[in-house]
Image: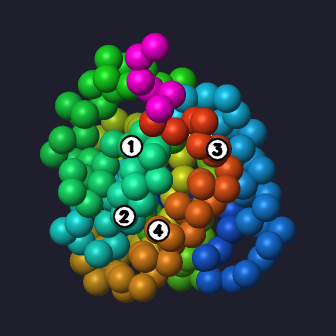
């Protein structure tokens, strides 16, 4: 879907790390902030995107990784959460999952110097805004990975994004979540008593 990241109020982005630099302090800050936001909550991950555009498969790749690790996930490579099914799938969340917190994950476009940046924000993301689609906001908090630069021909840019960039971001986002959210908050917490 691609989200265009516009930081009008930078205080809303709580943590940020770049996949292509090895800044341990930034990674630890990201993990501790995410841990604090999700502490003792049933978290549902909504991983938005499609496997039909390289730049837009970040969400489904992360969703596939998280599902393999036992987390509750909507949106994988096998069953993507995208513009055509987003509204129907979001309507099912309260009855199927009843999460205490929804964490939305999506690819976004930004400035050239920010490619590879992963942000954690305390607001929902607006999927599709990077390619001028009108979809409802998703999540209580959000993680966005900047996969390419935006500003011109966004849909084509998502199609031509390097797979290496997307795979690196997906791996790093998965690892950051794995470090922050313990096994006790995984899918088993969604099962009936």
Question: Crowding at label 1, few (<14), some or many (≥20) Cα neighbours within 10 Å?
Answer: many
Front residue of 91/7: it is 91
Q: Residue furthest front?
A: 193
Residue placed under numbered mark 1 in the picture = 73
| Residue 187 in view | yes
- Image vertical order of residue 8 relative to residue 92, above or below: below
Which element carries disc 4, helix, strand or loop? helix
In magenta, the rendered stretch is 188-193
- Image vertical order of residue 87 relative to residue 180, above or below: above
Q: Residue at x 21, y 51 (%)?
A: 79
On residue 182, the disc is 3
Please identify, in this view, whether the residue under mark 3 or under mark 2 is nearer the observer. 3
The first of marks 1 and 3 along the sequence is 1
Q: Residue at x 43, y 76 (%)?
A: 167
Residue 130: image location, x then y, percent: 36, 60
Which element carries disc 2, helix, strand or loop? helix
Residue 28: image location, x then y, percent: 79, 61
> Circles 4 and 2: CB distance less than 8 Å?
yes
> Circles 1 and 2: CB distance less than 8 Å?
no
Residue placed under numbered mark 4 in the picture = 170
Residue placed under numbered mark 2 in the picture = 61
Please identify, in this view, whether the residue under mark 3 or under mark 4 is nearer the observer. 3
> Circles 1 and 3: CB distance less than 8 Å?
no
Q: CA distance from mark 4 to mark 2?
A: 6 Å
């Amino acid at each position: 879907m691609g989200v265009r990241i516009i930081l009008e109020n930078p205080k809303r982005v709580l943590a940020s790390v770049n996949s292509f630099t090895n800044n341990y302090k930034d990674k630890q800050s990201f993990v501790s902030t995410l841990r604090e936001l999700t502490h003792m909550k049933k978290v549902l991950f909504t991983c938005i995107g499609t496997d039909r555009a390289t730049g837009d498969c970040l969400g489904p790749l992360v969703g596939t990784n998280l599902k393999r690790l036992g987390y509750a996930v909507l949106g994988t490579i096998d069953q993507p959460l995208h513009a055509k099914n987003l509204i129907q799938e979001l309507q099912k969340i309260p009855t199927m999952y009843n999460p205490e917190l929804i964490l939305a994950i999506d690819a976004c476009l930004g400035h050239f110097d920010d490619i590879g940046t992963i942000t954690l924000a305390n607001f929902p993301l607006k999927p599709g805004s990077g390619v001028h689609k009108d979809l409802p906001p998703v999540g209580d908090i959000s993680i966005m990975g900047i996969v390419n630069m935006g500003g011109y021909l966004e849909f084509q840019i998502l199609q031509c994004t390097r797979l290496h960039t997307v795979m690196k971001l997906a791996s790093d986002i998965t690892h950051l979540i794995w470090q922050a959210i313990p096994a006790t908050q995984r899918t088993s917490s969604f099962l009936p008593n």
